Amino acid sequence: MLVQPFFLLTSLNISFYILELLIKIMEEKIKSFEAWLLVSMLILAGFLTILLSTVSQPQGYTLIYAPPRAYNASDWMDIKAVYIKETQDKLYFYIEYYAPMPNSSEYIHNLFLYMDTDRNPQTGSLAYDIGRDFYINIGITGNNDSSWANLYKWDPTAKGWKKLRDLKPDMKLAPSLSYWEVPINKEDIAYSPTGMDFYISAHSSVLTIPATKITYTIGSNNRQITVDGNPGDWGTATPTLSLKPRGINPPELEISAIYLANDAENLYVRVDTRGKPTQSIPTGTLTRELYIYIDTDNSNSTGYKTYSGADYYAYATLNTQILKYPNIYYYKYTGTGTDSKWQQVSSTPQNADFNTVFELKIPLSLLGLKPQQKITIYIPEQRWFLHRLVPKTVTSITYPTQQTATTPATQPSIIARLFGSETLFLALVTTIIILEAAAITYLARKQPRHQPQPPPQPP
Ligand SMILES: [Ca+2]
Ligand SMILES: [Ca+2]
Ligand SMILES: [Ca+2]
């Protein structure tokens, strides 16, 4: 908001300068340096006009919400803006991301848009502050081999959600687009002019590691490890497993290597990613989960057969919000081989941490492991994801907004939309002013103004 007087002042300043130069041209007093300046100014003005005409919101839409950007490490994962358009019988949602998805099945968008269309928390399924009567679930993989878009309605009798309609045939949905456009029949969602409250819960996930099997012998790599997320205590250890590079966007969500070690008390697991793990995001959650299944007797005839005869597993959550929240839980297999029955045996949050790498430990006593025992570790396919609640937790968006529909309060200034940020724009304007002042000073020194001529002396 601060920059607007600057913007106005500079525009006026530049305009006057261009006008002054034009007058000089007309008076045929133009010098080459000034001509160069004039051309530059005209090019700049033309460029700004083009920029202004190309950057605009989707036609007919009203910007409802532009959430603050949560995650800068990736462009395709985060929601940039939510727009709504209304016709007599339809309501259109336009959900925009910062960029289209990378073209691969390793990436998935999965979004839920919950609506309280009678604006009554007593009806529907209560979550956050609204009684959700309908929801839309939209999803797509990066290579478009799978996509879906369905409308669901809350059934108060069955106390559950029922599918109402397939929305996919009517919507614009493609991984090559940085937005989705979905029309809904007002009649389907019992929409009335009173409006509705809604929020979006969006997951953007990445295949972090494909299913992986590693064997390890207790005692083969004895080390004193501190679980702090720093790899210095691993010395020059070579990875127990190196993974083939897949060029995942963002690199920090791709596991590159796994290291195993142990001392007399614990088995240690170190997990490296291709980028440094983000430690803090201002809103939302960067969810990282690791399931480490351990076949402690190295036999598929005991334990859970589906996961390589695993007798135990460690489940680590290594999440980032404003702060990081590492945690770990241990489970023992209690089924008969094909059923997934597990019992939690312990949870010790301080046994997992991350900084430049992920580190976790599993007490050997918990697994009943002894030196020289050979074990198999099975890590099933894992997906890590960014989860956003839009607008944010515990608040929903009301549509139509209370302000006039054309200028919602949440709309970022045109300057912020054009230049990315107002600070950047301010820097740009300051640079222009400095350059202009320098040019004027230069001209003033080089071409001193004409001294008024004394009137001709009478002969
Ligand atoms: Ca309701
Ligand atoms: Ca360490
Ligand atoms: Ca086993």
Image (tube, grey):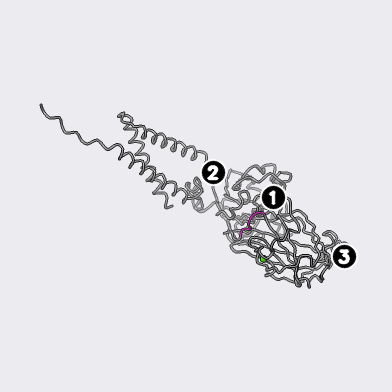
| Rendering coords of residue 30 (x, y %) | 33, 31
Q: Quadrant of the C terminus?
A: top left
Q: Which residue is mark 2?
A: 57
Q: First in sequence: mark 3 or mark 1?
A: 1
**Residue identifier under label 3:** 302
Mark 3: give few (<14), some (14-19) or many (20+) Cα within 10 Å: some
Q: Is residue 276 magenta?
A: yes
Regarding mark 1 in the picture, which secondary structure is present there?
A: strand
- Judge the density around disc 2: few (<14), some (14-19), many (≥20) Cα neighbours within 10 Å: few
Viewed as shown, does residue 458 lie left or right of 278?
Answer: left
Whichever of labels 2 and 1 marks the residue nearer the N terminus, that label is 2
In the picture, the disc for residue 108 is 1
Q: Left or right: 357 with respect to 440?
A: right
Q: Is residue 164 above or below residue 350?
A: above
Q: Residue furthest top?
A: 459
Which portion, as a residue range, is magenta?
274-278
The extreme front residue here reads 236
Earlier sequence position, callout 3 versus callout 2: 2
Look at discs 2 and 1 and give the one toward the viewer.
Answer: 1
**Which amino acid, mark 2?**
Gln
Would the CB of label 1 be found within 8 Å of ligand 1? no
Q: Residue at x 55, y 50 (%)?
A: 64
